[in-house]
Image (spheres, rainbow, N blue to C red):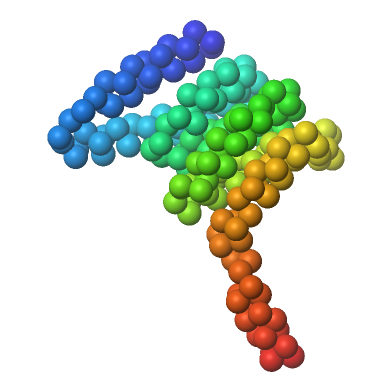
């Protein structure tokens, strides 16, 4: 299985390199986007509950974070890598969390939601019926959330004007 994964990852890497060369055709960019989307969907399905694939994808996390197309699908792959897998969650480095926050600030709303879900998978792991918090990762996430607080207030709708309007609606509805 590792051989299959490595050959797939290598061939998709070569395909992405080949399609990333300068071209004046818009069709090539669309084809590259569709290819990335399909590759990410395959990798997410392949990684689901497969520890060997999850570890391999984690070791390529920096490469995945460097891809600027199909960000939502890339985030879904990383969600599958970290979902209930404490071993890889504890190997995440602070610079990788910082990179995710940098991507969030430039991404579309679908990608933002998927990246936030991926970050949530980093904060806890399931042991039996219980979810155990991973304080180290929570601290990384809170550090970069705090640095980008104004951005997230706008994204999450926590602006002062909105809060006042919500309170006004609640009091008038009673």
The answer to whether one can see residue 76 in this image is no
Residue in view at x 60 percent, y 58 percent: 150
Among the 4 quarters of the image, the one containing residue 90:
top right
Depth order, front residue of 65/161: 161
Q: Residue 49, how many percent across, how many down?
A: 64, 27
User: Is 82 placed left or right of 5 in the picture?
Assistant: right
Residue in view at x 67 percent, y 27 percent: 92
User: Is 145 placed left or right of 24 in the picture?
Assistant: right
Q: Residue 169, how many percent across, how many down?
A: 65, 85
User: Is 76 placed left or right of 68 in the picture?
Assistant: right
Residue in view at x 73 percent, y 35 percent: 137
Depth order, front residue of 136/148: 148
Residue furthest top as drawn? 3
Q: Residue 111, how many percent across, how many down?
A: 49, 47
Q: Residue 68, how many percent across, how many down?
A: 41, 36
Residue furthest left as drawn? 24
Residue in view at x 33 percent, y 24 percent: 16
Residue furthest front as drawn? 147
Quadrant containing the C terminus is bottom right
Q: How many marks?
A: 0
User: Is 40 placed left or right of 1 in the picture?
Assistant: left
The answer to whether one can see residue 70 in this image is yes
Among the 4 quarters of the image, the one containing residue 59:
top right
Indicate whether 55 appears above or below 141.
above
């Amino acid at each position: 299985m590792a051989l299959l994964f490595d050959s797939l990852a290598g061939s998709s890497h070569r395909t992405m390199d080949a399609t990333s060369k300068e071209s004046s055709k818009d069709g090539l960019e669309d084809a590259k986007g569709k290819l990335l989307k399909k590759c990410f969907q395959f990798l997410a399905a392949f990684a689901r509950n497969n520890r060997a694939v999850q570890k391999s994808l984690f070791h390529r996390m920096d490469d995945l974070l460097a891809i600027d197309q199909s960000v939502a699908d890339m985030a879904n792959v990383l969600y599958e890598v970290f979902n209930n897998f404490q071993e890889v969650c504890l190997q995440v480095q602070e610079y990788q969390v910082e990179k995710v926050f940098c991507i969030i600030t430039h991404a579309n709303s679908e990608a933002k939601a998927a990246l936030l879900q991926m970050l949530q998978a980093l904060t806890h792991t399931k042991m039996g019926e219980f979810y155990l918090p991973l304080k180290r990762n929570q601290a990384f996430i809170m550090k970069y959330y705090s640095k980008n607080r104004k951005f997230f207030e706008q994204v999450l709708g926590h602006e002062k004007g909105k809060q006042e309007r919500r309170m006004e609606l609640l009091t008038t509805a009673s």
